[in-house]
Image (tube, rainbow, N blue to C red):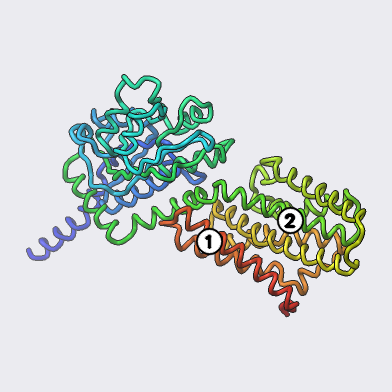
Amino acid sequence: MQRLWLLALCFCLAWAPGRAQEQPPLRIGWYAEAPFQKEGPSGLTGLDIEMVRAVARHAGQGLAFTRVPYTELMEEVATGRRDLASGIAWTPERAAAGRMSRAYRQDVNVLIQRREGGAPPSAFDAPGLLAHLRNSEFRIGVIAGYSYGDAALDAWLADPARGARVRRSGDDAANLRLLLAGEIDGFLAERLSAAALVAASAAPRAVEENRHLRLFIPLHLMFSREVPEATVVAFDAAIAALRADGTLDKIAVRFRAPVLLGLTLNSRWFFVLEVIGTLAGALAGYLAARSGRYSLFGALILAATTAVGGGVLRDLLVGRHPIGVMSSPVYLQLVLGTVLLAYAVGRVAAALPRLAPPSLGRAWRERLFDLADAIGLGTFSVVGVAVAVGTPGPLWLWGPLLGAITGAGGGIIRDIIRGGGDVPNLKTGFYGEVALIWSFLLASWLEWRSAVIEREEVLLAVLVTVSGAVVTRMALLRMRAPGLP
């Protein structure tokens, strides 16, 4: 008899997990909003998708995903036609229509505006933004049905009496089109999704994020009332466990880091850095051509090679499209303008009485060449790291590689053209090594700080990297350091 009881107990233990797995998956809706919910090469993914999958797996529950527009998703969950929706801000109406889990992540909503759109609001929170909207003619775009975490602000935005002051769209892409067309002055959007959208647009530098406003919104899972309360309790316990062991934070960093770094690097001051690098590279190429007694056309070739050659080589390597130099005519215009201006200055100087011996003039040209080449080396190393931010794989690996190619590649190609295969910078110049070392330091720091990084930190890091690379290169030239064996 005892053996029969043991057999029965073993059968129950073996049968129970199978029964748990036989539970039908929860029908969850998703809506396209990169980097939170998106279709990638390997299927449905995103920060929100991976978090919900981890929570459901921990709770022992399967999920069946279906793409549903956001506004329809809310209605389907409320009426029981859909079991679950993710990324939902808590409101009394939603809490009454369904079952809300505990918060599992947080949105940061910002105001996106045109760069040349006049004085932006200086509000720091939802009440401050609402006060600005009430006391100005600011035209704002929002997504219909969204909650921005403040009842008073939501009510003001939803009031039909606002007319053209509030434009309600289906998604951020529609609001961006309205902003670029001048039909609104700004729109509210989640910071990461807005950054991804702007970076992929045709005019990424035409708009910018308001630096003052931050709306922090806790997000929940919203279950249908048809879902058993025990299931919601199991999800709440899973959320608490995964927050405690850091699983949700690790998922957030994996998806947030590339977008946030791209946001901080896609700014006006970074464009200024690219311009400085292009000017320095073009000047170095021209001075190299003058030392070799090249023609004006030859000077243009060497200047363009130095200024944009490394970037072209980098973009071909990573399959970047379009190639950076082809995305805007400004870079080649800078090269052309630098060469023509330097050529004109040189002709004028040649026509003036010589106030110094020729040897002194050559010495100054060599020093100016070394300085310009060092500035180009440092600035383009940073540009290479910035491009590496958007590539798959660890930044500490791709950052130094692309930084060295971008920073030193143009100078090396220039010297190959000049020297016919004899390239001093690959023998004794300690040239590419400077770009590699400082790119590695910058990439490692960016990866370490990626979860909490802000623009001001990146600006400081970039300035330190460029200055460090320039000082290192000039000091080594001063000492005439030999190359590595």
Q: Are marks 2 and 1 in contact (CB under 8 Å)?
A: no
Q: Give the residue pinned by disc 1.
A: 461
Is tag 2's residue or tag 1's residue first in the polypeptide sequence? Answer: 2
Q: Give the residue pinned by disc 2.
A: 281
Q: Is residue 439 above or below residue 302?
A: below
Q: Secondary structure at mark 2?
A: helix
Residue 228 at x, y percent in the picture: 18, 40
Q: In the drawing, does residue 354 fall left or right of residue 365?
A: right
Q: Secondary structure at mark 1?
A: helix
Depth check: give the residue in front, 72 or 340. Answer: 340
Residue drawn at (61%, 69%) of the image: 437
Residue drawn at (57%, 60%) of the image: 463
**Res. 362 image quadrant:** bottom right
Dot 1: within a 10 Å radius of its alpha carbon, few (fewer than 14), some, or many (20 or more) residues? some
Q: CA distance from mark 2 to mark 1?
A: 22 Å
Residue 229 at x, y percent in the picture: 16, 42
Dot 2: within a 10 Å radius of its alpha carbon, few (fewer than 14), some, or many (20 or more) residues? many
Residue drawn at (90%, 68%) of the image: 357
Q: Amino acid at mark 2?
A: Gly
Depth check: give the residue in front, 468 or 144. Answer: 468
Q: Amino acid at mark 1?
A: Ala
Residue drawn at (38%, 58%) of the image: 250
Q: In the drawing, does residue 157 fall left or right of residue 323?
A: left
